[in-house]
Structures are given as C-alpha cells and as structure tokens.
Amino acid sequence: MELNEIVAMNIVELRKEHNWTQAELAAKLNYTDKAISKWERGESIPELATLKQLAEMFGVTIDYITSPKPKAEKKDYLLPGIIKTNRILITAISTSIVLIIATIVFVYAAIYLEKYLWTLFVWSVPAGMICLYFFNWRWGEKKFTFYIVTVFLWSILTAIFLETMQYNTWLIFIIGIPIQITVTLIGFLKK
C-alpha cells in the first residue's frame, strides 16, 4: 500500500470518527473541501505542517496518520493525556477570564461610580459561551455545540430582559422559541 493511500484511509477514518464532513474539516484547516476530497481519494498528501495540524486536531500522532495499522493499535498513537488536559484547562481559564473582567468592572463601578451593575454577571454568561464555542470548535466535540448555543441564546435573552425590565419586555423570550427550534433542527441535520 502506498503512502498516499495510507494517509487517505486514515484521514477518512479519523474524520468519520469525529462525525465531521469534508467541508467542516476543510473549514477547521482553512482549506477547501476539494483539497480534503483529494487527500481522501489518495490523489495528494497534505503538507507536513498540515499533517501536524491534523494529528493535533484528531488527538493522534503524525505516525498514526502515515502508518498502516489495525484500529486496535490506535492507543499506541494517541496524544498523551496531558495535551487533552491542557486543552480543557486552557478553555476553562479563557472562559473564566470573562467572569474576572465582569467582577473587576462590577467592583470598579461599585466603588467609584457608586452603581451596582450586577447584570454584568448575567452578561458574562453569553460572553463566556462565545469563548467556549471557539475552543469547542477548535478542540472539542461537535455534540457540545448544541448546548453551548442553547445557553448562549437563553442567557443573552435573559440579559436583555433584565436590562429592559422597566419596559415590560418579557415577550422577548418568545423570540427564543423559534430560534431554539431552528438550533435543534440544525443539530439533527448535521448527523
């Protein structure tokens, strides 16, 4: 078996394990889906830098992508657990920075402006979800996207409602219903 066929077989296997389409993988790598298709047909091989990026994205080594082997040997090629742990910690730290910023602004406003802007903490939830969405898109699993988008939607509607409560804007939550239905249907569509 030639190297281009081995790489093709392994990329297809890994992409399908992650339930990604060729277009989704292409977007993550900043390539076209036609390039991914060529790799998967064995017509070309990704450059070394791209192989490294693929290996990191799929949580395996470059050796895994370039070696013929049965699936049972996969454990020999998995990235060390420390990398996965670090990715989780980087995501958690980045998301918590949003809460730290909200706390600093709250304390500053309470001390110097004598205003208690407690809604900043509510606004920090959708901001944190944006951060979480980015890291989930980069390193995470597609199945969590639904939950992240759902929390983002309802927390932003709650934040808007709390800011405009004096105008009796509770109907804003009705806007969330068709959006939530659409998000749910999109989740089923991609499977």
Image (cartoon, rainbow, N blue to C red):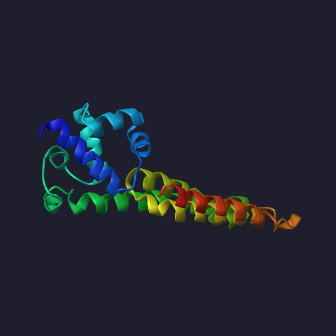
Tell whether 52 sits left or right of 104: left
**Name of the residue lying farthest toward the right:** 167
Q: Position of residue 19 (x, y in %)?
A: 39, 56
Q: Name the side, left or right, on which 124 lies relative to 90.
A: right
Q: Eyeballing the image, is 12 above or below 148?
A: above
Does residue 72 appear anywhere in the picture?
Answer: yes
Q: Nearer the viewer, residue 42 or 56?
A: 42
Q: Is residue 30 above or below residue 162?
A: above
The foreground one among 117 and 153 is 153
Using the image as rendered, state which of residue 133 and residue 27 is in the foreground: 27
Quadrant in which the N terminus is drawn: top left
Task: Say which of 79 and 69 sits in front.
Answer: 69
Query: Residue 181: x percent and y percent?
Result: 66, 63
Q: Is residue 134 above or below residue 36?
A: below
Residue 153 locus on image (x, y percent): 64, 61
- Quadrant for residue 26, please give it: top left
Q: Quadrant of residue 167?
A: bottom right
Number of disc labels: 0
Residue under the image location 35 percent in, 37 percent down: 37
- The residue sitting at 40% across, 57% down in the picture is 140
Q: Looking at the image, can residue 111 be seen?
A: no
Q: Residue at x 71, y 66 (%)?
A: 158
Return the x and y of residue 107 as percentages of the image width and height. Answer: 62, 63
